[in-house]
Image (cartoon, rainbow, N blue to C red):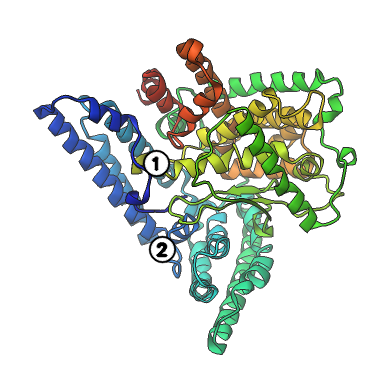
Amino acid sequence: MANAQSPSERKPDVSNKALITKSTPSINADTFKNQGADAALHKLADDYYAWRNENYPVRSSDTGLHTWDDRLTDYSPAKIAERAQHVRSLLDKVRAMKTDGWPKDARIDWILFRAQLENVDFEDRILKFERTNPQVYVRECTDAIFSLLKKEYDTPQRRALAATARLKQMPALLKQGLSNLQKPVKLYAQLAIQSARSIDPLLNKSLMALDVDLAPNEHQDLIQARDGALTALHNYADELEKRLPKMVDFAPMGEANYNYYLKRVLLLPLNAAEVEMIGRAELARYRALEALLPDPKLADPDPKRAAQIPPDQASFLKAYESREAEMISFLKEHNLVTLPDYLGAFQIRQLPEAFKPTSPGGFMNPPGVYDKEPTGFFFIPTYNPESKNFYIRAAIEDPRPILGHEGIPGHFLQLSIANHLSDEIRRQHEDSVFVEGWALYGEEMLMRTGLYPNNSPAQGQILRLSRYRAARIGVDVNLHTGRWSFEQAVKYFMDAGGLDREAAEGEAAGAASSPTQKISYIIGKWQIMNLLGRYKDRQGENFRLGQFHDDLIKNGSLPVSVIEWILLDDPAAVQQATK
């Protein structure tokens, strides 16, 4: 999801484009023409981002743009069709551009913007979640409030008034959602029911923290709107439950569509069969590496081995967050990555119950692309020292592997840097394969550079985390190409991935709800490792690991195939993905 800050507030351009411009001795007519085409492309992109931000106001709030905090997205059939047609028309226009003579950087921007539009068009044409996925409407309600609470971007009163306006619109939104859901999927409906019935703490407790400076009539308005929204959400869940017997269990997109998405949206030079093969190879490797540990039990987190078990939630959060300083010191001491001076604080918070059905391990909430405040958050599950949840057990024993993935050097660092790009098309790009690949690569990189001692719980955890990320690939590919049922996916996570049932069900639900997202981790890491070897060979005696990391993440959240073109001047992977 995305939002905007003026490019004039960003750092000076140090991209290849700036360097090429400085080194060009003269400009001929063709160059003038190409510059005009490049400017036209960026104008189309800027107009599209402005249109998108206004049409998806909750998404805008979530990414730090608070212009439309009092609105929800219009999900009327006419508006859904109008938005889809707008994107399709723009995509046709971008596809028709003749870019063969453009400079490399301009051509890269064209490929990236086209992929961004392909993503939205694919959702409109193939996934059609407004008609099939009841989670769309619950998530709109949840994010509508959550996006107003997570940062103190304005006074509590103004945020409370915005929340009141959104709460008042929720009953009509949910009614429209029930009308739109002509072909709902049972699995998605079951997840939506869980989320709708878990939203009460968010509205009854978290939201009411904003009720501090409201006038009596404003307070009463907020209470009435909140109660009306809660009633509507519970009724929505009840109605979905009544409809469950007539719903299809799951509706895969099919292999042809899956392959289209891999190449046209993710710009991956791989098809579904090749992706699954990489997953199987990596799964075999990490299962074997677990077995090769002097004590293989270390791969299964056990709080009893921890030096100290936190007594309560507050102590748990504090202990979790305190380990970040130690990791930052290690990174600096070994010159593994440069931390920019604009980097904000990274905080650990409790996961709202409404997000638990599809995010059993919590989730990272980075600074939004339009945020002026640089803080990031990692939301972790409710603390319970007796929990069987993998993520809770792992965090009690040693939180550093997960912290390195979510914080520094993982998501928080990488996405903070991406937000500061001067090229707006690249700043807006959100390639999940690179984002998750970098974070997973960082887990093992920290282990291999010496942060964790041999035969330690942290080392075992790194191997188990990679093992179940490899299992995710088999689940994602086989679910969405139609080869597996949901129960087969859960069982595979337990048997092959080594997860407990609770974590496995949540993982499978996440895979079903977000096609291709679960392949991102291992495939992105595999691509980065491949690039690292090639980069090292090219640099020869000048190679430095920290420089590779800086060169890699300074480009934003771009597909690795594109980064290969930028760093190695090799467009082969992009050409293979786009042919």
Q: Which callout, 2 or 1, points at the residue further toward the start of the chain?
A: 2
Q: Please name whichever residue, 563 or 188, is drawn nearer the observer in this view of the structure.
A: 563
Task: Locate residue 239 relative to residue 488 in the image: left or right.
Answer: left
Residue 90 x, y percent position in the rendering = 28, 45
The residue under label 1 is 421
Q: Is residue 328 visible?
A: yes
Q: Is 77 located above or below residue 2 in the figure?
A: below
Check the image and report above or below for 548 versus 36.
above
Q: Where is residue 155 in the image (x, y as percent from the top left)?
A: 51, 72
Residue 273 in sight in this render: no
Foreground residue, 24 or 175? 24
Q: Which picture quadrant has residue 473?
A: top right
Q: Which quadrant is the C terminus positioned in?
A: top left
Q: Would you call the spot at circle 2 few (<14 residues within 10 Å), some (14-19), or many (20 or more)?
A: some
Residues at discs 2 and 1 in contact (Cβ within 8 Å): no
Q: Which residue lies furthest to the bottom in this view?
A: 216
For mark 2, what is the residue?
Answer: 76
- Secondary structure type for disc 2: loop
